Image: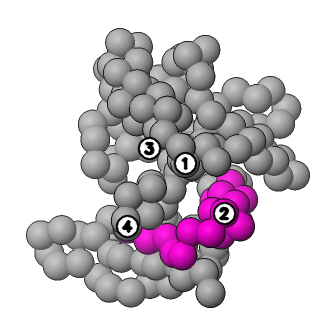
């Protein structure tokens, strides 16, 4: 199964499409929203298209993937993303445009995706966040992901895991 459409009370979670480049650009260009992520904010639509091809379109061509655009039901316009990688670590990640922070959207979207990957038989997910970004850890905690380890002063990452028994 590859990124099946999911719905919550407020959200539609779906694949990004070529028509979403402007929305994806708005998500990826913001320095504050992307401050703790392993990439730099994009500068233009061309960089956004490359990011989409490498991180979304490529995954959509695989047999199984979970790489979602987070959209409000009111307009189905992407305001963020949530994903679980299919590599062995099953890394869970998310991001939102900052004007949508503090509304429970990341928790709501994350909960829907976690329920789907659990239903589909993934044995666990892992997640990390920068120690300087405790709000991301709060989302993980609300989702029931268990804090396992704090990184050293070089990595600044803190590790989390959720097993599905």
Contact, mark 1 vs mark 2 (Cβ under 8 Å): yes
| Residue at (87% x, 52% y) in the render | 9
Against 75, is 150 above or below?
below
Give the residue number, with chain letter if any, for mark 3: 33
Asked which secondary structure carries label 1, the reply is loop
- For this rendering, which residue is in front, 67 or 75? 67
Circle 1 Cα neighbour tier, 10 Å, few/some/many (<14 / 14–19 / ≥20): some
Residue 144 in view, yes or no: yes
Judge by depth and name the residue closer to the eye, 69 or 80.
Answer: 69
Above or below, comparing residue 164 to residue 10 in the picture: below
The answer to whether one can see residue 99 in this image is: no
Percent position of residue 161, x then y: 46, 79
Q: CA distance from mark 1 to mark 2?
A: 10 Å
Q: Nearer the viewer, residue 65 or 110?
A: 65
In the rendered structure, find residue 64 and report the number of the disc placed on it: 1
Q: State yes or no: residue 127 in magenta.
A: yes
Dot 4 corresponds to which residue?
A: 89
Instruction: Point out residue 150 in the picture as x, y percentages from the top left corner.
Output: 29, 82
Up-down relation of residue 130 to residue 95 (above or below): below
Residue pointed to by mark 2? 120
Q: Secondary structure at mark 2?
A: loop
Here the colouring is one colour
């Amino acid at each position: 199964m590859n990124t099946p459409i999911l719905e919550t009370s407020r959200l539609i979670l779906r694949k990004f499409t070529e028509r979403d480049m402007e929305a994806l650009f708005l998500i990826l260009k913001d320095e504050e929203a992307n401050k703790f992520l392993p990439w730099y904010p994009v500068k233009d639509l061309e960089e956004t298209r490359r990011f989409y091809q490498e991180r979304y379109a490529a995954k959509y061509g695989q047999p199984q993937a979970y790489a979602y655009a987070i959209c409000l039901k009111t307009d189905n316009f992407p305001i963020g993303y949530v994903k679980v990688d299919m590599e062995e670590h099953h890394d869970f990640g998310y991001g939102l445009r900052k004007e949508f922070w503090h509304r429970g959207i990341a928790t709501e979207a994350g909960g829907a995706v976690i329920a789907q990957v659990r239903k589909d038989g993934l044995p666990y997910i892992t997640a990390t966040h920068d120690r300087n970004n405790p709000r991301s850890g709060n989302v993980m905690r609300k989702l029931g992901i268990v804090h396992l380890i704090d990184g050293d002063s070089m990595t600044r990452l803190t590790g989390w895991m959720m097993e599905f028994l």
